[in-house]
Image (spheres, helix red, strand yellow):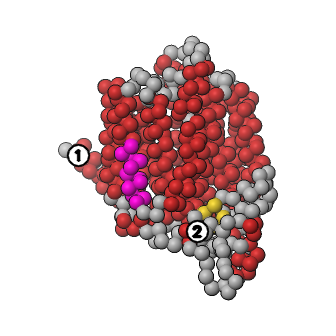
Amino acid sequence: MRGRELTGRGIATFQRAAKADGADKSGLTALTYATMANFATDAALVVALSNTLFFSAATGESKTKVALYLVITIAPFAVIAPLIGPLLDRLQHGRRIALAASFVARAVLAVLLVFNFDSWALYPAALGMLVMSKSFAVLKSAVTPRVLPPDIDLVRVNSRLTVFGLLGGSIAAGGVAAAVAALSGSTGVLWLTAAFSVGGAVLCLRIPSWVEVTEGEVPATLSYHGDDAHTVVIDKDRKTTVKPNKRRQPLGRAVVTGLWGNSTIRVLTGFLTLYVAFVAKSRTEHEALVQAAMLGMVGAAAAIGNFAGNAAGARLQLGRPSLLVLRCTIAVTIVAVIAAVADSLIAAAIAALVASGSSALAKVSLDASIQDDLPPESIASGFGRSETALQLSWVVGGAMGVLLPTEYWIGFTAVSAVLALGLVQTFLSYRGHSLLPGLGGNRPNHAGQEVSSDQYVQQTGFQQPTGHPSP
């Protein structure tokens, strides 16, 4: 009886937190539950495939197998990821259906994995689940502005979704999946993954219908080339403009700086996710328990950093978000260099701690920049575009984690070189310059413009967005 009482109190406390600040009326609570289901599905899949997807190709003797693993699981997503954002812009209706479909597809693939666990069908099925998970993340980022409670900003809403996902999804579901794996092996966990996916699909359909209202949305664009860009077109008498879905809203300097910094950090987090698993497996002198302990140390460090970064980001006053992103990028570059010099598991765990914490803080800062920089009609598209870029950066880091040799100093030296380039581009974007024309910070800092709307259109060819000035 005491156990039931404590369980009931815990559930009631959780529900109060999920519905706080008017989240139940705005629809945020429904999206929170769907996000938790996504985290839970991913956690269960990792447990189910822990002895195959991460390890079967990680033998030091089979470089061909490693290359095949990369080609089948990671390379296709690098092609698919850039298409998700533009496809989302064209999805004017049915976003709840699209979110639910990402879960239904994973449920089907999980069942296929049950019956093809020991064949090469494992890899394309795992790829499909990876793509569906990343697609959910992009779709969710575009839906979130539509369920925003009146008393909370987007920055805290995104942090809140991540914290709920980590606690109620990854940690809780991961523990359940581990228990199921101990009792019935990977097959049982795959059935659990399918069950989580079905539940996620149902939860997506319970998101309020007003997230489907996309009238007047103006798609955001990452590129910027001055007056000749394909953006707002105004006729000579200044009375009419083209339709919103034909216009494009370029991202401002603060957002682009945040994107470059976050993308740089995601390279390191993607690298660590796969690289440490390959290093652990390559140490044939270690028993399975020791290999699991190596993974557990780095995984725990990453989880602590992620949770701490999101918790801190939800409470910080982000007056200069682009500067915070730059500092986070500097931090991860330095810790990667230190890990290369130290050449040890402890250094890798510290790198995971700093990288995950910095990734969370930088993402919160990017969210703040998007909210301040873009007009309301482009915020949803801006979030979708940014999430696509970040997912693609993670894939680049994951590819490096698969391909690089399993000596710590070699792997971290190589990724440090990539991070250094990203840091230079982030700094140049922050200063209003760029290594890549059209994709850097050499553009108007939209929220800081002090000209009239007509003057701004005449000078740049773009609509002037609203928001608070950025530094």
In the image, residue 108 lies in the stretch drawn in magenta? no
82 versus 142 height, above or below: above
In the image, residue 95 lies in the stretch drawn in magenta? yes
Dot 1 or dot 2, earlier in sequence: 1
Q: Position of residue 78 (x, y in %)?
A: 59, 41
Q: Position of residue 140 (x, y in %)?
A: 47, 55
Question: Which range is magenta?
Answer: 94-105
Q: Is residue 89 left or right of residue 173?
A: right
Residue highlighted by disc 2: 246
Q: At label 1, which amino acid type do we have?
A: Arg
Query: In the image, what residue occupies the spot 63% across and 67% down?
Result: 249
Label 1 environment density (alpha carbons within 10 Å; few <14, some 14–19, many ≥20): few
Q: Quadrant of residue 318?
A: bottom right
254 versus 328 height, above or below: below
Q: Quadrant of residue 1?
A: top left
Q: Which mark is residue 4?
A: 1
Residue 169 shows in this picture:
no
- Quadrant of the image containing the C terminus: bottom right
Query: In the image, what residue occupies the spot 72% across and 41% down?
Result: 419
Q: Nearer the viewer, residue 438 or 281?
A: 438
